[in-house]
Amino acid sequence: MDMKLSLSLAALLTLSACASNGNGTATGSHAGDKAAVGAVIGGGGAYLGCKLLGGSNVACRNLAVVGAAAGGYIGWKQGKEQDLAEAQAFADKMRQSKVPVQTDTGTVRHQDDKGQPVAYTAWRGTNVGLPPKALAAGDPDLQHSVELAGQLAVSRHESTTVIVSVPAKQRENVLFWLNNGFQQGTAANDTTPPKIQEVPYKKGSLPYLRVQPTDQQQFHA
């Protein structure tokens, strides 16, 4: 292997390691980072393999474009699957605690490795009901559930918004619990903390909170 190819291989390994390092992300989402890693590995690997076989610069660059597209799509798909799996795992914990929970999904669109549009089901948000009696009593189990919701929000690998609708008397407690969760969670993106959006509570309705990606425009009907 000549010096240029050795340096190219080293750069490829460095880029892929940086993109997948730790709990943080480079693009702001599981899908985005996995697509980036897939594109780096797919495109760079195709180019290096081509050059090792004696291919011309033009031919190898063309092959790299194809490899990057394939790797990027696979990475994006895996990222969306991981995002949804994490939300479903959270919902399972809520059900074990007898807390009402609902996971919403939506359709997102992307291009596959052939440049064709594809639709995929992704996590759109999670609704968590807060039983009034437990909420009024400051129930420790409910507090833990709200803290877990805070952890979910802060550890998502995309910007999140937490919508809160609770009686005024319980507002301070719920916000305190949420912030505990923010502190306990592993922040995936330190520059974009979760946003809290308060919605006026309607007397007689079930208090709730909802964790969702801030970018809701990515979803299609």
Image: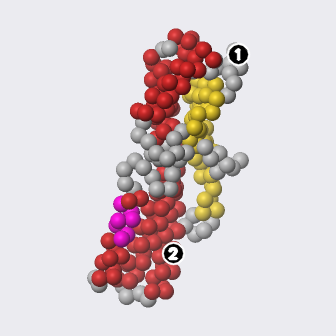
Secondary structure of the residue carrying tag 1 is: loop
Check disc 2: other Cα within 10 Å, few if <14, some if 14-19, many if 20+: some
What amino acid is found at the position of numbered circle 2 in the picture? Val
Q: Is residue 185 above or below residue 129?
A: below
Residue 31 in the image, given as x and y percentages of width and height: 51, 54
Q: Which mark is residue 203?
A: 1
Magenta: main secondary structure: helix
Q: Is residue 149 above or below residue 83?
A: above
Q: Which mark is residue 65?
A: 2
Q: In the rendered structure, which segment of residues is drawn in magenta? A: 11-17
Asked if the stretch drawn in magenta spans residue 13, the answer is yes
Residue 56 in the image, given as x and y percentages of width and height: 44, 89
Residue 103 in the image, given as x and y percentages of width and height: 57, 35
Q: Is residue 191 above or below residue 205?
A: below
What amino acid is found at the position of numbered circle 1 in the picture? Lys
Check disc 1: other Cα within 10 Å, few if <14, some if 14-19, many if 20+: few
